[in-house]
Amino acid sequence: MRILITGGAGFIGQHVAVMLASEHELVAVDSLNAQVHQHAEAAVQRFPGQVVIADVSQASTWDALPGFDVVVHLAAETGTAQSMYEAGRYRAVNVEGTRLAAAAAASWGAALVALSSRAVYGEGRYECRRHGTRFGARCCPQAEAAPSREEDPHRPVSVYGETKSEAEAILAEYAAAIPVTVLRPQNVVGFGQALHNPYTGVLAAFLARLREGRPLSVYGDGSATRDFVHVDDVARLITWCIDHPGRLGSLRVLNCGTGERTSLTDLARFAAAAAPVASAPVEYVDVGRAGDIEHAVASLEGLRSAGAPLPLMSSEQAVADFIGRSWGLPGADSEAWDVALRELRQRGLTS
Ligand SMILES: NC(=O)c1ccc[n+]([C@@H]2O[C@H](COP(=O)([O-])OP(=O)(O)OC[C@H]3O[C@@H](n4cnc5c(N)ncnc54)[C@H](O)[C@@H]3O)[C@@H](O)[C@H]2O)c1
Ligand SMILES: [Zn+2]
């Protein structure tokens, strides 16, 4: 098949492309966003197919493309905290870009697989003996965070999450015309994730600090939890969605995570254990960032009932693989994350 991958030069796109390249003809559309790509030329070289350098939020980009059998829509602006002060750019790329991608896929009769995010859930699901199920906030201290399910309501707390939620609503409108699958990845980790971009990824910050022998810096008290899923498990799920397009008529939505809850303190421990240096202490920085949430973990029930592949790697294995394979790669100094945090402070986006 002829497959178009928007954002194909990026982290997840490159892994998907490697899995698809032997059986399919691939074209990437990618703007080679400078914040993500320090070495844009190398990203283009790595992609096993043609790379069209263009912006998905421009109609002219889509007018210039031939038809495809499948569209994998990955292109997006991805920094949660940055989205709070760059809202216009985030909306243009994530919402308008998705609208144009869906319209083009429909005009070609192509199946569409689009990446949303767990950010649509915001603070997610809480279960409480006294108050029952609540979404988006803890009702009382007894409430326990529970895995988010695909049917849960959207409660985004960042502009990034809002743009993903709006994009999903647009995708639902196209599900009558073409098969559309939306995936909601949790935190994706692995080789090739941006090591220069201080606007995403706590793990890249840990890597930089480990290499410099600085203590690992955790924002908050370390009890916040996330679900870290390996990029190859994400790519395998995307490939499965291409091979098994959903039914016409309704949007197919699937979570994408390990279903395991990892605290930031555990994450620091996993990262330090995987590093080829003496283990580093953890320092807790008493700061909250606008758009951040306390707990996130995926329910895998939706994947199970769809017969979709479950992740092969645990979060600890995924983190170890990332640290081991990224150790010798160039990346930003840890100072870059300190600068990004100062920038948020100056904008009044911290508490
Ligand atoms: N990595 C994660 O943890 C994670 C989690 C949840 C969802 N997602 C989603 O997965 C998708 C892929 O993310 P990723 O981690 O590979 O990020 P990435 O930044 O590595 O890749 C995104 C790619 O899109 C390109 N791009 C950005 N704006 C563009 C535009 N206007 N036109 C064309 N190309 C553009 C970038 O140059 C980059 O190559 C995104 O939609 C993201 O929101 C990622
Ligand atoms: Zn309660």
Image: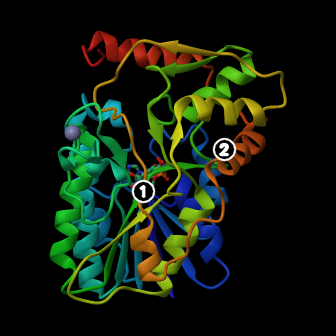
State the residue position of label 1.
Answer: 298
The first of marks 2 and 1 along the sequence is: 1
Q: Residue at x 48, y 83 (%)?
A: 307
Q: Position of residue 60 (x, y in %)?
A: 26, 63
Picture layout, residue 329 above or below residue 227 = above
Amino acid under disc 2: Val
Q: Position of residue 301 (x, y in %)?
A: 41, 70
Q: Are there few (<14), some (14-19), or many (20+) residues within 10 Å of tag 2?
A: many
State the residue position of label 2.
Answer: 319
Q: Residue at x 60, y 34 (%)?
A: 266
Looking at the rendered image, the disc whose residue lies closer to the viewer, 2 or 1, is 1
Q: Residue at x 56, y 40 (%)?
A: 194
User: Which quarter shows the C terminus?
Assistant: top left
Cα distance in 3D space between marks 2 and 1:
17 Å
Picture layout, residue 69 above or below residue 77 = below
Residue most extreme to the front = 130
Q: Position of residue 320 (x, y in %)?
A: 72, 44
| Residue placed most toward the observer, 147 or 285 | 147
Q: Secondary structure at mark 1?
A: loop
Q: Residue at x 47, y 13 (%)?
A: 285
Picture layout, residue 107 above or below residue 100 = below
| Residue placed most toward the observer, 215 or 341 | 215
Q: Position of residue 29 (x, y in %)?
A: 44, 63
